[in-house]
Image (cartoon, rainbow, N blue to C red):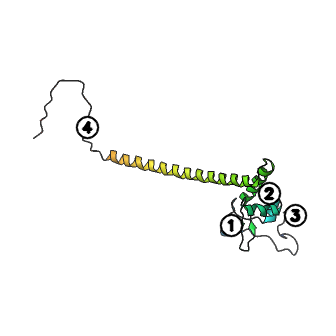
Amino acid sequence: MSPDNPGIGAGLGEGLPGGPGPRRRPTVAAAAAYVLTEETPVYVISVAAELSGLHPQTLRQYDRLGLVCPDRTGGGGRRYSARDIQQLREVQRLSQDEGINLAGIKRIIELENQVAALQSRVAELAAAVEGAGAALQAREAAVHASYRRDLVPYQPAAQSSALVVWRPRR
C-alpha cells in the first residue's frame, strides 16, 4: 500500500474510509488446516472451464464419460483440482491436435493410470528388496561375528608324502 494512494493495493477496503479495516493473516494453525496441493478440489465448473479453455457443458460431458472426474461438494456441485485442469487440457490437446476420439482418450488415460500404479508398485518392491538385502547382510555379519576365533581356516598343503602324528596334550 502506498502512502500517496491508500486505495491501491489495499485488501478488502483496507485503508479506505468506512472499510472493514486491514485483513488479518490466518494463524499458523488455520493455514495448516488448508494445505493446498495440486489434488485439492477448489475450482467451480465456471472457473475450471475458463482455466482449461473449454465450455462448461464440455466439462460436464467429460465428467459423464469418465474422462475427468472432479470431486463433488455435499450439494453435488463439481470441484476441480489443478490436476483436473491439467487433465482437461490434455484431453483437449489429444482431441484437437492428435485427432483421437473420446473413447480412445479414455483408454489412453486408463493406460497411463495403470502405468503409474505399476511404477509405484515397482518402487515399493524395490524398497522391499533393498530392505531384505540389508537384513540379509546384517544376519550374515552376525553369523560371522559368532565364529569361534580359535578355528584356523584349512589350507591344503602342497603335495607331500610326510606323515604327521598328532598327539593330544595331557
* Residue type at numbered disc 4: Val
**Image mark for residue 52:** 2
Q: Which residue is mark 1?
A: 34
Earlier in the chain: of badge 1 and badge 3, it is 3
Q: Which image quadrant is residue 157 in?
A: top left
Pick the front one: 142 or 38: 38
* Residue type at numbered disc 1: Tyr
21 shown above or below 113:
below
Q: Which residue is mark 4?
A: 152
Earlier in the chain: of badge 2 and badge 1, it is 1
Q: Name the residue at 89% across, 64% down.
A: 5
Task: For marks 1 and 3, give the CA distance.
Answer: 28 Å
Q: Nearer the viewer, mark 1 or mark 3?
A: 1
Q: Which residue is mark 3?
A: 8
Task: For marks 2 and 1, give the CA distance.
Answer: 24 Å
* Residue type at numbered disc 3: Ile
